Image: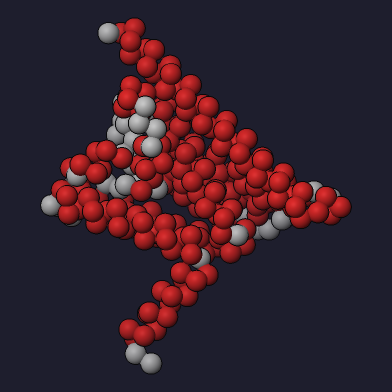
Amino acid sequence: MSTQTRRGGAVARFFRLQPVTAWIITANLAVYAATVVQARSFLTNNASPLFEATALFPPLVAARDEWWRLLTSAFQHFGPMHLLLNMYMLWILGLGIERSIGHVRFLALYLGSALGGSVAVMFYGQGALTAGASGAIFGLMGAYAIVAMSMRLDVRGIGVLLVLNVGVSFLVPGISLAAHLGGLAAGAVAAFALVVVPRRMPRRVGRTGREVVSWVGFLVVVGSVGAAGWFAADTMTFGFLVTR
């Protein structure tokens, strides 16, 4: 068997077993390629009109109601190293999480965590142009830790990974600590509602009952995060009007 055939089989297996992870990575790579073409630069892709229209800049969300930036910013990256590091982490976490909790739940946790990271930026990074999947990735790490603790599994590995990554967020300039911690908190709480609570419910509730409770709980979490984002934007707009 040739090397090319083995690689093709591995990619096909990845898309079959972890399709959400695979397609999120594909989407990020495609968006990055589009920004590179627009900017005509592999390194300074943030000069792209697409990047400028979709990265998170809180004043634009507040003043122009450009709410899509809260999620689209999670698919933009500053340069190739930023992209590759995030995609590597997403690949590792996707292998460990997606099949264990289900594809739909994994996607919900990813997007909910991305939203949580962006909302935290709305509060604590209002003057910064922010982009990257790291808020969502921190959310997946938080979700992994919560689910593992609920199952009484060894969490030392994910604990060390979290400590190292939070430490880097504090120490390295240019990294959005708000996005990381916001994503971490949102992912942990969402995982508790979506995965832990239904597993702890009595068997007599039935599968349908557990599904309803888990998704209602998740929607409450996401709704609360969204309401916090609206409050941050409303406060920011009010402050802007006053200072003018």
Can residue 187 be spotted in the picture? yes
**Residue extending farthest bottom:** 1
**Seen in the image, is 181 located left or right of residue 63?**
right
- Up-down relation of residue 2 to residue 227 (above or below): below
| Quadrant position of residue 74 | top left
Residue at x 67%, y 50% (from the top left corner)? 195
Can residue 168 be spotted in the picture? no
**Residue extending farthest right:** 204
- Up-down relation of residue 87 to residue 133 (above or below): below
Residue at x 72%, y 44% (from the top left corner)? 213
Q: Which of the pair 166/146 is nearer the observer?
A: 146
Q: In which quadrant will I find the C terminus?
A: top left
| Quadrant position of residue 206 | bottom right
- Up-down relation of residue 231 to residue 168 (above or below): above
- Percent x, y of residue 221: 60, 36
Q: Which of the pair 17/65 is nearer the observer?
A: 65
Residue at x 52%, y 70% (from the top left corner)? 17
